[in-house]
Image (cartoon, helix red, strand yellow):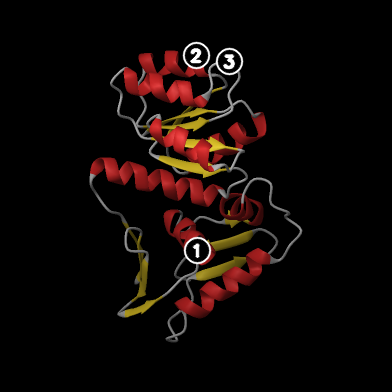
Amino acid sequence: MRILVVEDDPAVSAALDRALRLEGYEVTVEADGNAALRSMAIAPPDAVILDLGLPGLDGIEVCKRIRGAGDDSPVLMLTARDAVDDRVQGLDAGAADYLVKPFALAELLARLRALLRRRGGEGEVLRFADLVLDLSSREARRGERTFSLTRIEFDLLELFLRHPRQVLTRDVLLDRVWGYNFDSGTNSLAVYVGYLRRKTESGSEPRLLHTVRGVGYVLRER
């Protein structure tokens, strides 16, 4: 699927580009509204991630023009402002969802997947060995045993399930789950991997989340 990112902050656009490509999306990045509209006219995307505070033609006007042209691509609007009026304006202009900066990349990716599923009318279930994660119901299961997850635990497990047998570095995991501006000096990742292990192994099941010393973690059977 092709995602159009319209964002004038180089750090944010680079983080989004990297994260989306890792998820397997084809990505086009534009830094202003007029360039975004020209890009959409040439190659309509499956979804648009649109910053509200763009130079020149702002995100509200871009969204209005997208809808005025009859394009129903889902738009996820980003803004540094958390005012109710801003959210209302964005939704009234035709945005399907709204996310306030700074945000965790995992939350943005989850919202994007939800928009794409809603458009396609399908849910998604991730599986590895006897571990199952239903993204629509947010239900987690190991064999016949179900267990609950916090938001961070869910995002982490989803990331591992989307990349089975692939070693994910500590920096990638922190970037994707906690956000591009997260302090990498904390031990939050190790703590939450420990939480996940306790929940996925509470029935004495074999370990699936393994530590790769000095690198990160991997989801594998042995």
Quadrant of the rendered image containing residue 51: top right
- Looking at the picture, tell me which residue is in the foreground, 65 or 172: 65
Instruction: Report the residue that reaches farthest toward the left.
Output: 121
Q: Residue at x 43, y 82 (%)?
A: 205
Residue 165 point in image, percent of width and height: 47, 59
Q: Is residue 180 above or below residue 39?
A: below
Disc 2 to disc 1, C-alpha distance: 36 Å
Q: Residue at x 37, y 31 (%)?
A: 94
Image-based side of 32 in relation to 135, left or right: right
Residue underneath mark 3:
56
Disc 3 to disc 2, C-alpha distance: 8 Å
The mark found on residue 163 in the picture is none
Give the crowd class for mark 3: few <14, some 14-19, many >=20 residues within 10 Å. Answer: few
Image-based side of 35 in relation to 13, left or right: left
Q: Residue at x 54, y 34 (%)?
A: 17
Question: Amino acid type of disc 2?
Answer: Asn
Residues at marks 2 and 1 touching, judged by CB atoms closer than 8 Å: no
Residue underneath mark 2:
34
Give the crowd class for mark 1: few <14, some 14-19, many >=20 residues within 10 Å. Answer: few
- Sequence order check, earlier mark of 2 and 1: 2
Instruction: Report the residue that reaches farthest toward the right.
Output: 185
Residue 77 point in image, percent of width and height: 48, 35
Residue 76 is at least partly visible in this image: no
Disc 3 to disc 1, C-alpha distance: 37 Å
Residues at marks 3 and 2 touching, judged by CB atoms closer than 8 Å: yes
The local secondary structure at tag 2 comes to helix
- Sequence order check, earlier mark of 3 and 1: 3
